Amino acid sequence: MGRLLFGAYPGDAPRGIRELKEKMVTTQRRSGGQATRRHFLGAICWRFPNERLLWDGSHLRFTNNEKANEYVKPYFRKGWELNDIT
């Protein structure tokens, strides 16, 4: 990695290091979010054994099971609502 870094920015290693760190942080956020989403979807699917659930990522819902969609949006008891989310 060092050769690529210094080869891409001869004489300007700090710039190369800065750009490399930015790429790493962006990639970690993106892959972390994807892993979290897969984990939560897996937890929902676990509640419906022997059923095939179809996920629509653009609308953030299951297209073939309304009961499964109830787990996508959280339910809050009275007094514990989060107005920005619900």
Image: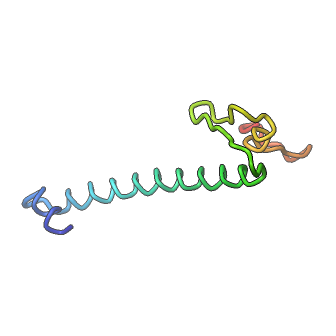
Figure quadrant of residue 81: top right
Q: In the picture, residue 39 is in which quadrant?
A: bottom right
Of residues 33 and 64, the one drawn nearer to the viewer in this rendering:
64
Q: Nearer the viewer, residue 72 or 55?
A: 55
Q: Residue furthest front?
A: 50
Residue 16 rendering spot, x and y as whole percentages: 20, 58
Residue at far left of view = 10
Q: Which one is nearer the viewer's eye here, 27 or 14? A: 27
What x and y, as percent, mark residue 51?
A: 73, 45
Q: Is residue 3 left or right of residue 68?
A: left
Residue 57 left/right relative to 76: left
Residue 79 sits in which quadrant?
Answer: top right
Residue 49: % across, % down: 76, 52
In what quadrant of the picture does the N terminus appear? Answer: bottom left
Name the residue: 69% across, 43% down.
Answer: 52
Front residue of 26/53: it is 53
Return the residue found at the far bottom.
2
